[in-house]
Image (spheres, rainbow, N blue to C red):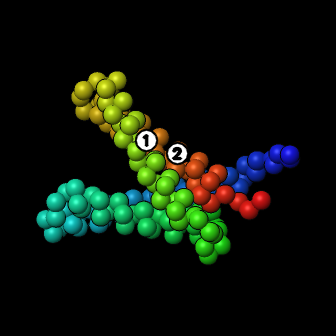
């Protein structure tokens, strides 16, 4: 079994593109949330879910074409993408809950818990997208 050497330049490019895609999906998701919640008076939970789904849909396109530069449709990648999104969200909620219990119950503690949970969500997504969802051809 051969071990491939890690191409740091390629990985840095992936991480930069992943970050850029994240900014775009977050901006679109937030725009949908605010338009529905503040603009149209839709229940905030429904607005949030709609924003998350729209952002996730854009994310799939960006991850496939821009970040990992896969062929038009790699078999199974959409199902794996959805599985990772669900897993990362569940992990985010678990970390948020645990951090919320461990940190002070004030604004700073709440903000730190959110940041730790977001970091976990983002790192988990990148690792699983890179190694499983959009893995390079052997």
Q: Tell me, yes or no, whether the two marked residues, 2 and 1, touch with CB atoms within 8 Å.
A: yes
* Residue drawn at 32 percent across, 36 percent down: 111
Find disc 1 in the rendering and name its residue.
91
Residue furthest left as drawn: 41
Residue 65: image location, x then y, percent = 59, 70
Residue 122 rendering spot, x and y as whole percentages: 48, 47
Report the residue at 52% width, 45% height from top: 124
The extreme right residue here reads 2
Distance between mark 2 and mark 1 Cα atoms = 9 Å
The correct choice, above or below, for 116 with respect to 3 in the image is above
Q: Secondary structure at mark 1?
A: helix
Q: Residue furthest bottom?
A: 72
Q: Is residue 24 visible?
A: no
**Marker disc for residue 21:** none
Give the quadrant of the C terminus.
Answer: bottom right
Please rate how many residues cluster around mark 1, counting C-alpha atoms within 10 Å: few if below 14, some from 14 to 19, many from 20.
Answer: some
- Helix or strand or loop: what does disc 2 sit on? helix
Q: Which mark is residue 124?
A: 2
Measured from the top left, where is residue 86 in percent x and y? 43, 52
- Give the number of callouts: 2
């Amino acid at each position: 079994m051969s071990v491939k050497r890690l191409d740091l330049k390629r990985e840095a490019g992936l991480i930069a593109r992943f970050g850029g895609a994240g900014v775009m999906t977050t901006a679109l998701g937030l725009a949908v949330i605010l338009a529905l919640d503040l603009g149209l008076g839709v229940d905030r939970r429904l607005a949030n879910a709609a924003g998350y789904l729209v952002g996730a849909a854009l994310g799939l396109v960006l991850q496939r074409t821009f970040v990992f530069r896969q062929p038009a449709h790699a078999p199974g990648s959409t199902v794996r993408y959805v599985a990772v999104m669900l897993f990362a969200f569940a992990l985010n909620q678990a970390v948020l809950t645990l951090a919320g219990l461990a940190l002070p119950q004030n604004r700073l503690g709440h903000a730190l818990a959110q940041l730790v949970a977001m970091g976990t969500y983002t790192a988990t997504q990148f690792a699983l997208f890179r190694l499983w969802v959009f893995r390079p051809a052997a």
